[in-house]
Image: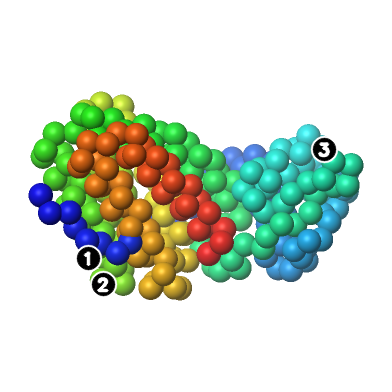
């Protein structure tokens, strides 16, 4: 079989994934908003935990949880005894596409997907029948068509990941992924909307990652498939904040 030589795309509404916002999510989003607006600039020390707690009407443990997530997402860094500092300013265009209180949830969804879909890709390389692998290839080709048409391609993106989950021959992978469709689409929608601002760089990069995953599955390389999928989702998470 000839491998496709791809170079490397709607809208999901946050209303689809409504849930009561955690206090730490609100603090997390509020700090990001201030960074985006330039109120906290790169290299600047954030207010103390006590001050942030007072500003947000929450306890210090809530602030610590928000700061921990911001560190995990590479937006702030901390020095023992010296407080937390802004490490990077995300792409301001995020304000156009995502409610700030949704970002913490979306980042945690990326973490879960890396674990779930890494194993999904590994098992697809072991268990996927030729017809299932062909379905993954068709989804990859549909993504390529979206790129050529400069379309967002959120549904095609999800279809690619779902085809891999189905190729595990274990319905719990595909059922779990389907149950997360609204959350996953929301993250994909944000990443791809940001990507369309530089389509000649972002979308081919994403498609290269998809292609590597497909080739590893087709060639029955389970550990490679797992690694490439985890890298892809990690990169997707990074691209959301780096724009």
Where residue 226 appears, as percent x and y from the top left, is 36, 37
Q: Are marks 1 and 2 in contact (CB under 8 Å)?
A: yes
Q: Nearer the viewer, residue 135 or 217?
A: 217
Q: Kindly indicate the quadrant of the structure image that contains residue 37.
A: bottom right
Say which residue label 3 marks: 60
Residue receiving disc 1: 145
Q: How is the image coloured?
A: rainbow
Q: Is residue 59 above or below residue 240?
A: above
Mark 2 sits on what residue?
149
Instruction: Provide the secondary structure element on which disc 1 rests.
Output: helix
Residue 178 seen:
no
Q: Residue at x 61, y 68 (%)?
A: 92
Q: Residue at x 44, y 46 (%)?
A: 231
Q: Say which label, 3 or 1, has the lower sequence index.
A: 3
Q: Residues within 10 Å of mark 2 (few under 14, many from 20)?
A: few
Find the distance from the CA under tag 3 to the CA under tag 1. 50 Å
- Residue 168 found in image quarter: top left
Q: Where is residue 232 drawn, in percent x and y?
A: 41, 49
Element under disc 3: helix
Q: Are marks 3 and 1 in contact (CB under 8 Å)?
A: no
Q: Nearer the viewer, residue 3 or 13?
A: 3
Q: Which of the two labelled residues, at mark 3 and mark 2, occupies the earlier sequence position?
A: 3
Numbered marks: total = 3
Viewer-nearest of discs 3 and 1: 1
Where does residue 181 sit, x and y in percent of width and height?
Answer: 37, 44
């Amino acid at each position: 079989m000839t491998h496709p030589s791809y170079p490397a795309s709607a809208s999901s509404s946050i209303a689809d994934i409504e849930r009561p916002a955690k206090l730490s999510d609100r603090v997390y989003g509020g700090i990001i908003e201030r960074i985006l607006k330039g109120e906290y600039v790169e290299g600047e020390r954030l207010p103390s935990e006590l001050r942030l707690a007072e500003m947000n009407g929450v306890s210090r443990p809530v602030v610590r949880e928000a700061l921990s997530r911001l560190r995990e997402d590479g937006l702030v860094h901390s020095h023992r005894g010296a407080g937390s500092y802004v490490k990077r300013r995300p792409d301001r265009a995020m304000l156009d596409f995502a409610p700030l209180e949704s970002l913490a949830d979306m980042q945690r969804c990326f973490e879960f997907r890396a674990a779930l879909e890494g194993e999904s890709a590994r098992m697809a390389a072991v268990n996927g029948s030729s017809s299932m692998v062909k379905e993954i290839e068709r989804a990859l080709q549909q993504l390529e068509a979206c790129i050529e048409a400069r379309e967002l391609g959120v549904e095609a993106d999800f279809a690619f990941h779902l085809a891999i989950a189905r190729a595990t021959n274990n319905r719990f992978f595909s059922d779990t992924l389907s149950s997360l469709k609204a959350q996953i689409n929301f993250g994909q929608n944000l990443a791809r909307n940001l990507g369309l601002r530089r389509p000649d760089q972002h979308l081919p990069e994403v498609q290269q990652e998809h292609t590597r995953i497909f080739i590893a599955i087709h060639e029955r390389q389970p550990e490679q498939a797992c690694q490439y999928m985890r890298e892809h989702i990690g990169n997707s998470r990074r691209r959301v904040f780096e724009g």
